[in-house]
Image: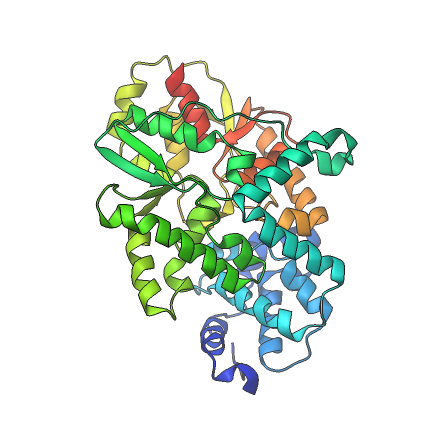
Amino acid sequence: MQTKLADFIRDTADGAEADAILRKCVHCGFCTATCPTFQLLGDELDSPRGRIYLIKQMLEGEAVSARTQLHLDRCLTCRSCETTCPSGVEYGRLVDIGRKWAENLAPPRSAPQQVKRWLLANTISQPAVFGAAYRVARALRPLMPSTLAAKLAPSRPRGVWPSPRHARKWLVLGGCAQPALTPDVNAAAARVLDRIGISLIEVRRDGCCGALRSHLNDHEGGREDASRLLQQWQPALERGEVEGVVITASGCGSFVREYRYLFRDDAPMLAQAGKVVAQTLDIAELIARETHALDECLVKRALGGRGAIAFHSPCTLQHGLQIRGVVEGLLQRAGYELTPVADAHLCCGSAGSYSLLQPEIATSLRDNKLAALAAGKPVGIASANVGCIAHLGSAADVPVRHWIEWLDEALST
């Protein structure tokens, strides 16, 4: 793709990066076949290729309208197109640049939109604030419209967290929304790891990884969240008290994996981020390293007759972290039968705050995903990200839980 960037961006870091990414695109259109919004809406401008053209025109100096911003807002940033692209176009980074500049060049958003986005960025990212707000909302659930009430899952208490008794220890990210929405996920991970000789240590109120504010165009706020998290993790890692950091939410894990990119212009933070990222794993990666110990625990259990479950692989797991087949193998090891899921590469519509900002599209994608997951008549659904679990659980007819909770159940019975 030939580019001629406008003066306002030509000599900037964003301009250099965008130019390099744009020049990789060969207009092949393979991305349209795996783009959830294009498949749903049928509009070329709601495909990666169409959005690339919009970003190119904007960075070349053409006028930016609210409609341009709308098409960029509608992108889920699922990165399925990156998995498909034969040219290696880093679309996720390009659309972040596009959104950043569109926010400055497009007409101002309406006051209600601005307030909504600010509240999402500054409420959900604060665990104490979000937890309190969520408890109040759950109490008022009978008074709410059915569409909003469905998003408020019944209270799920956190189970027992084993005391640290093993020489091997790992830190775990608590996160921002997960303690309120799915409080037993990290505890379940702690119980599973405890059985295979690893103690899981949580840092109380460690908070958001930075993804939420960054994806809502508050890039400085996202870096502040990420920097604070690194400062909390670094001492235990430097002293060798823990082997590393494990993350149970694939959305957070995918963003943490990008910390080197996030701090690319800050040499001290870049060095720190590089060390931490090198010692950070998704929970599936950690348990996959310990399959011998896991098998020793499983051999003592009756593994048959658990019923079939469907696995929804979040976009952040399969396209962001590029972890494919690992969770499925662990669940099958534990005796679960996995049902086939059509179009497993497509997003469920959660995408962080997307389901709250683009509810109609998110609901359609959720319903399509649930139909695909239910086709094999599973007794439950497993996933790997808090947002997907909450989004799918708002309309599913069977339990939707983190896969580590299903594994914990297999080890407990």
Residue at (45, 25) in percent of width and height: 406
Relative vertical location of residue 411 with respect to residue 22 in this rendering, above or below: above
Q: Residue 74 in the image: state x and y as whole percent.
A: 65, 57
Which residue occupies the foreground of this view, 238 or 95? 238
Q: How is the image coloured?
A: rainbow
Relative vertical location of residue 3 with respect to residue 226 in this rendering, above or below: below
Which residue occupies the foreground of this view, 305 or 180? 180
Relative vertical location of residue 113 with respect to residue 387 in this rendering, above or below: below
Which residue occupies the foreground of this view, 110 or 7? 110
Horizontal arrangement in the rendering, residue 190 relative to residue 151 (left or right): left
Residue at (48, 77) in percent of width and height: 19
Horizontal arrangement in the rendering, residue 268 relative to residue 229 (left or right): left
Q: Residue 256 in the image: state x and y as whole percent.
A: 41, 52
Count of number-bearing discs:
0
Horizontal arrangement in the rendering, residue 70 relative to residue 410 (left or right): right
Residue at (66, 46) in percent of width and height: 362
Is residue 36 in view from this perspective? Answer: no
